[in-house]
Amino acid sequence: MTATASRTGTAHALAGATRAALPRAGAPSRGAYPADRSSSALAASLARPIMDVLFGRRPLHQVRSRLAPQVRNLLGSRALRNQLGGATPDRLRSLHARAVDRDHVEGCAVISTAGRARALVLRWERSAQGWLCTFLSPV
């Protein structure tokens, strides 16, 4: 066997292995369901933008399309800050999320505000437009 034939055979073997690793047509892609992603990835992608609005680091209009009307109204008013002791939160201590099923994710954020730790619970639902935060409440 020549060196060229050996390399060609290796290339064909690698191409076959790559094709075998690809998902079959119509199969959901990896990460298509929340349970396929780690809880830290869920928390980062779904809750951090909301926390940024709460901390005053991001304008509400940037995440408006990802919020249900009641959550959007809560973040846009002073009501949530009043429930958190009147101060603007200053630090995110921890953030956790868990897939309830393929279309629902629930999470918890622990934040610092005025020297105290406060917890918030959140819920997201999958919609035609993507993930929508449908519930936000201090504990």
Image (cartoon, grey):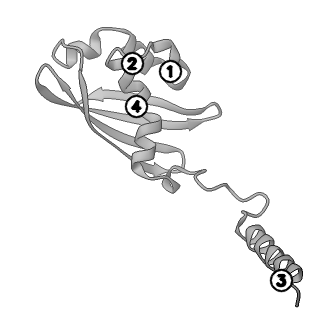
Which part of the image, by quadrant, shows the N terminus? bottom right
Which residue is label 2 attached to? 53
| Rendered image quadrant of residue 22 | bottom right
Which residue is label 3 attached to? 6
Comparing 13 with 41, the one in front is 13
89 left or right of 6 in image:
left
Task: Tell me residue 80's x, y (percent).
Answer: 28, 16
Which residue is label 1 attached to? 63
Above or below, 114 against 33 in this view is above
Which residue is label 4 attached to? 48
In contact (CB < 8 Å): disc 1 and disc 3: no
Task: Tell me residue 33's x, y (percent).
Answer: 56, 51
| Rendered image quadrant of residue 138 | top left
Q: Residue at x 25, y 14 (%)?
A: 81
Task: Tell me residue 82's x, y (percent).
Answer: 21, 12
Q: Residue at x 52, y 17 (%)?
A: 62
Q: Residue furthest left?
A: 115
Comparing 102 with 116, the one in front is 116
The CA span between labels 2 and 3 is 58 Å
Numbered tag placed on residue 84 in the rendering = none
- Disc on the earlier residue, 2 or 1: 2
In contact (CB < 8 Å): disc 2 and disc 1: yes
Instruction: Check disc 3 and report its element: helix, strand or loop.
Output: helix
Q: Residue at x 45, y 45 (%)?
A: 41
Instruction: Check disc 4 and report its element: helix, strand or loop.
Output: helix
The CA span between labels 1 and 3 is 54 Å
